[in-house]
Structures are given as C-alpha cells and as structure tokens.
Image (spheres, rainbow, N blue to C red):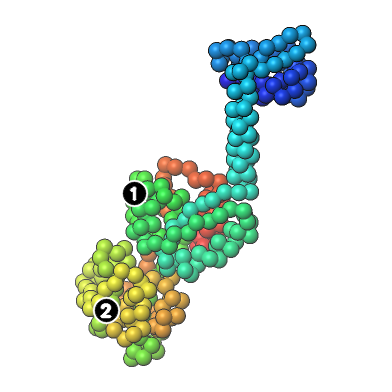
Amino acid sequence: MTIKQLRAFLAVARTKSFAEAGQQVFLSQPALSLAIKKLEESLGGPLLTRTTRTVALTPEGQALYEIGQRLLADWDNTEEELQQRFSLQRGKVALAAMPSFAGSLLPSALLAYRAQYPNIRVEVHDVIAERVVDMVREGRIEIGITFDPGPHEDLRFQPLFNDEFIAVLPADHPDAGASEISWTQLLSYDFITLQRPSTVRQLIETQLAQRGMSLRVTFDAHQLATVGRMVATGLGVGAVPALCRQQMEELGAHCSRLVEPTISRQVGILTRARHGLSVAAEALQGVLLDTFKQ
C-alpha cells in the first residue's frame, strides 16, 4: 500500500464517484481504477463494490476508510512538521554548558539565536564540565560547551576561545589591591579548590607539577560557586576560570590576574563525531561560532 493508492481510495470512498475522485487526486479514471486494483491486491481482497451507477464500500473498505483517514492525517502532519523543522519554523535543541559559561556568556548567544529563530525551543543543562562530556557522548544533548576534553574518537571539539585562570581573594586580603598575583604568592595562603576528579583541579595540578609546584589544599568543594563563597568569607584564596569573574565578584570576592605561570584552557563546542546535528542544532552551533570564535 502506498500513500498515492491510499489517497486514491479515500477520494473514491468519500465521493462515491470515480470521476469526481479522479479530479480530486489528479488521475484519469483508468489510472484511478488501476491504483484501487493494486491496493486491493496488496491487501488481499475487495474494498469497493461497483456497478455502472454506484460505488459502495465493503466492510473491509469501510474499516480502511476509517483507519486511512487517520493514517493520512498523521502523514500530512508529519510532512508539515518536518518541513517546518527543516525551515527552522519549529523544533527543539538540547544544550549542556559548564555553569561558568551558562551563567555568563551563553545568554547573549541565546538572545541572538532567538532573534533569528523565535520558534525553536532551547533546553539548557548547566552541569559541570565532566558531565557535559558524558551527556554529549550518551546522545542526551546535541551540543556541549566545555573545556577541551582532549582527543576522543567519538567526540568532536571546536575551540571558541582561551580562558585564563584568575586568582580569587577575600575583599580585605592584603594582596586584593594588586592587579596581578603570582602562583607562588597565591599558594602561600590557605588554598580552596574543587574536589577531585574535577577538570579544573586536574588542570591546575598538572600545570603546576610541570613547574615543580604543588597545591596545598585547605578546603575543597564540589561547585565553583561554593569556592567563591568560601573565599569571600575569608577562609582562604582560590583560582578559577576567568569565565567565573562576574560570579566571584557578585559573591564578594576580589579577582586578580594570575601569572607565573599563566594557566589557560580552550573552551569550545563539543559534539558527537559520527552523528549529524539537527537543523536547529546546526543553526545554534553557527550562532555560537559567530558570537565567540576568536
């Protein structure tokens, strides 16, 4: 059974006339009769009883008429919905981003995206960097914004910009007035950082170890916001990605440039390597690249 055959049958069943049905589906009467015949052959029995003057439905024909109307409506709705999705008139895209990015830079990109595609719904998951990678790999979301996770055969990373680590100090700290501070100075104070196996902590420890330095951690926490609150309270100092600057300052901490060494990491778009994006996700990726690509 084909859609063309079903349309032909429904037209005959509705009009009870081969001539009128042929006009509705743009088929000659011989072509219409052939379509009905092939449909009956494929289903295994007669759907119509015909005389020279009348056309009537068999019980099986009546059943197909009722089912066929629903099938055709679903087909037409599916066709229309997919056309709308391909033309970005409707749809949904799921995105995961590190909280430091989701709470700072992402809203401006979403504003630009919505201005272009107002009928696309964006579902945002603000989760830690490691979870972004997992969600992309599992196919739960199409696009992730995170630090470069390193080489993975099943993932594709497109860099957007470098994010340097900055020092976070209590507002009344003796070094809070300095525009920059060295790691040696920072590590002379009680240090607060994220718990292992945080990507942020791993990066700091690796970079410092390459220079013969090590962290002496006094407090650790699961979220950067908690680190910021603890620093602002005066429990110690910390180092966070520059993406967190606004959040840290809103919590009451002071931020300074962190040098000797300068530690940075690429932030970018993460997608599955062997899977295409939906049209809506492809468009969002384009907006992100246009907005943030350096």
Residue on which disc 2 sits: 191
Residue on which disc 1 sits: 152
Residue 267 can be seen in this image: no
Quarter the N terminus occupies: top right
Return the disc, 2 or 1, that comes first in the chain's sequence.
1
Identify whether 204 is placed above or below 66: below
Question: Front-most of 193 and 157?
Answer: 193
Coordinates of residue 206 in the picture (x, y in percent): 26, 65
Task: Residue 209: name its quadrant.
Answer: bottom left
Badge 1 element: loop
Query: Distance of mark 2 from mark 1, alpha carbons?
Result: 32 Å
Q: Amino acid at mark 1?
A: His
Badge 2 element: strand
Coordinates of residue 29 in the picture (x, y in percent): 75, 14
Q: Amino acid at mark 2?
A: Phe
In this view, which residue lies farthest toward the top? Answer: 52
Task: Residue 190: name its quadrant.
Answer: bottom left
* Residue positioned 32% across, 80% down in the render: 230
Task: Residue 258: name its quadrant.
Answer: bottom left
